[in-house]
Amino acid sequence: MYARKDRKRRAFTLVELLVVIVIIGILATFVAPNVIRSLGTSKVKLARAKMALIENALDRFYMDCGRYPSDAEGLDALLYNTGDPGWNGPYLKQSQIIDPWGTPYIYVAEGAVNQGSYDIISLGADGQEGGDGENADIYND
């Protein structure tokens, strides 16, 4: 017959499991707010970076067509030919005129913030005018 070796099986006790769960909970309470806060600031930075891409595309449109799009044409003039013979687009992809919160950027041909030029506006996380923090409106420089 086979001799049975005595093996001591060691498992985690309930107290050890509870201690680990408490430690994970404490870490999560300190780390989670920082991660969520940095996610919001990352979206604002991404919105500004996308605005720079749109500005570049608007400048290329201007070089090809000799004008900037009108308010009526908006940013769609960068995607589709509106009848200009010099149009050499598309200058952007559809996804590049959508802000990080899923709302299309607003184009204003006669800018109020950038007087003498155009405004590109993201309404922030709330999608409404005004707001603070992540909900604040973002304008191109």
Image (tube, grey):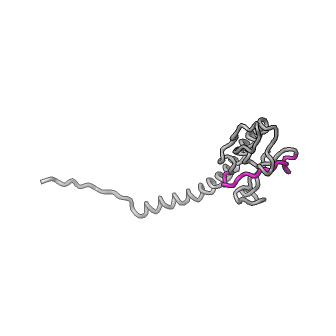
Magenta-highlighted stretch: main secondary structure?
Answer: loop
Instruction: Give the residue at the far left of this rendering.
Output: 1
Q: Residue at x 66, y 47 (%)?
A: 94
Towards the viewer: 100 or 27: 100
Residue 19 is a magenta residue: no
Towards the viewer: 125 or 79: 79
Q: Residue at x 70, y 50 (%)?
A: 44
Looking at the image, residue 46 sits to the left or right of residue 110; the answer is left
> Which stretch is magenta?
99-115
From this view, report whether residue 125 is shown above or below residue 70. Answer: below
Towards the viewer: 139 or 16: 139
From this view, report whether residue 64 is shown above or below residue 43. Answer: above
Residue 19 point in image, percent of width and height = 47, 60
Q: Quadrant of the N terminus?
A: bottom left
Residue 133 placement: quadrant = bottom right
Residue 24 point in image, percent of width and height = 51, 58
Looking at the image, residue 115 sits to the left or right of residue 129; the answer is right
Residue 102 is a magenta residue: yes
Residue 53 point in image, percent of width and height = 71, 42
Q: Quadrant of the C terminus?
A: top right
Towards the viewer: 125 or 59: 59
Q: Residue at x 23, y 55 (%)?
A: 6
Q: How many marks?
A: 0
